[in-house]
Image (cartoon, rainbow, N blue to C red):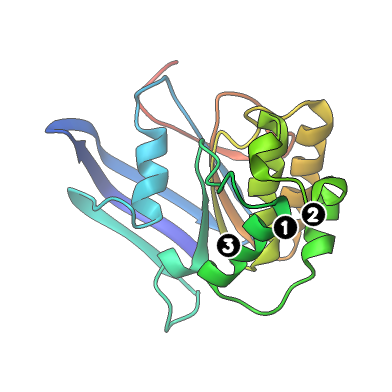
């Protein structure tokens, strides 16, 4: 499996964010997207996820499921945690599993993997910022998709949470997964770097 972009151009609000961008990442690889604020890191993830249309160039996936689109084979973890505050932690996870599709899963196991099994019945509105991030990460492992697109994945996580996330990412890569992560800091794993917009 290989994800690649050739001559990708992004325009938002009538402003060119970047152009002529080439990138490539294969199974088992982490591509760390770096650059100053406003350089287009988030926009690139949204282009790959199919949430934005490129103004030029192409983004392709080779070796994935032929009958599925790139977007259907990717998880997008934005910098804001997409949770329903009135639903419990467990209900939020079940909502995403049903929305995204996929086989039956061990919800308790997914929550335990991110250290939230003790809060399964707590409304998401009561979670701290770090706990909300952990719940978003649980979505990644509750429904299998080979590509993880992650925007500042360590945001709001304490040292223990960052270590836990690094372990989950390492396991995903070891199973042939692929990760593209926009980040300002180290992720705790070996990564290839794609810098957008010159020096930070």
Q: Position of residue 91 (x, y in %)?
A: 67, 59
Residue named by callout 1: 90
The residue nearer to you, when weighing 164 against 85, is: 85
Q: Quadrant of residue 17?
A: top left
Q: Element type at marker 1?
A: helix
Report the quarter where the N terminus lies: bottom right
Front residue (pair 106, 60) = 106
How packed mark 1 is, by other alpha carbons closer than 10 Å (few <14, some 14-19, many 20 or more), is many
Which residue is tagged 3?
96
Asked if residue 82 can be seen in this view, the reply is yes
SS label for mark 2: helix
Q: CA distance from mark 1 to mark 3?
A: 10 Å
Circle 3 crowding by C-alpha within 10 Å: few under 14, some 14–19, many from 20? some
Expressed as whole percent of the image width and height from the top left, the position of residue 80 reads 51, 37
Is residue 28 in sight in this rendering? no
Residue 32 image-quadrant placement:
top right
> Within 10 Å of the Cα at label 2, are there few (<14), some (14-19), or many (20+) other Cα atoms?
many
Q: Report x, y in % for residue 66.
A: 43, 82
Q: Residue at x 66, y 43 (%)?
A: 124
Q: Are marks 2 and 1 in contact (CB under 8 Å)?
A: yes
* Furthest residue toward bottom: 67
Residue drawn 73% across the image and 39% down it: 189
The image shows residue 148 at horizontal and vertical percentages of 57, 54
**For mark 2, what is the residue?**
111
Which of pointers 1 and 3 indicates the residue nearer the eye? 1
In the displayed structure, 180 sits above or below 60; it is above
Q: In the figure, 15 relative to 91: above or below?
A: above
Question: Given this view, does label 2 or label 1 mark the residue nearer the observer?
Answer: 1
């Amino acid at each position: 499996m290989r994800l690649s972009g050739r001559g990708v151009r992004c325009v938002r609000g009538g402003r060119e964010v970047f152009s002529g961008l080439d990138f490539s990442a294969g199974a088992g690889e982490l591509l760390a997207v770096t650059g100053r604020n406003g350089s287009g890191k988030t926009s690139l993830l949204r282009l790959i996820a199919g949430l934005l249309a490129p103004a030029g160039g192409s983004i392709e996936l080779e070796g994935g499921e032929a009958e599925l689109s790139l977007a259907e084979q990717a998880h997008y973890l934005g910098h804001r945690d997409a949770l329903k505050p009135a639903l419990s932690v467990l209900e939020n996870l079940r909502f995403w599993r049903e929305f995204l599709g996929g086989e039956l899963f061990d919800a308790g196991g997914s929550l335990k993997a991110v250290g939230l099994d003790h809060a399964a019945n707590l409304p998401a509105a009561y979670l701290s910022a770090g706990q909300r991030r952990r719940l978003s990460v649980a979505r990644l492992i509750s429904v299998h998709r080979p590509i993880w697109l992650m925007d500042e994945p360590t945001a709001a996580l304490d040292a223990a949470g960052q270590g836990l996330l690094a372990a989950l990412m390492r396991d995903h890569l070891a199973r042939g997964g692929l990760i593209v992560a926009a980040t300002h800091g180290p992720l705790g794993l070996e990564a290839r770097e794609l810098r957008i917009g010159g020096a930070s």
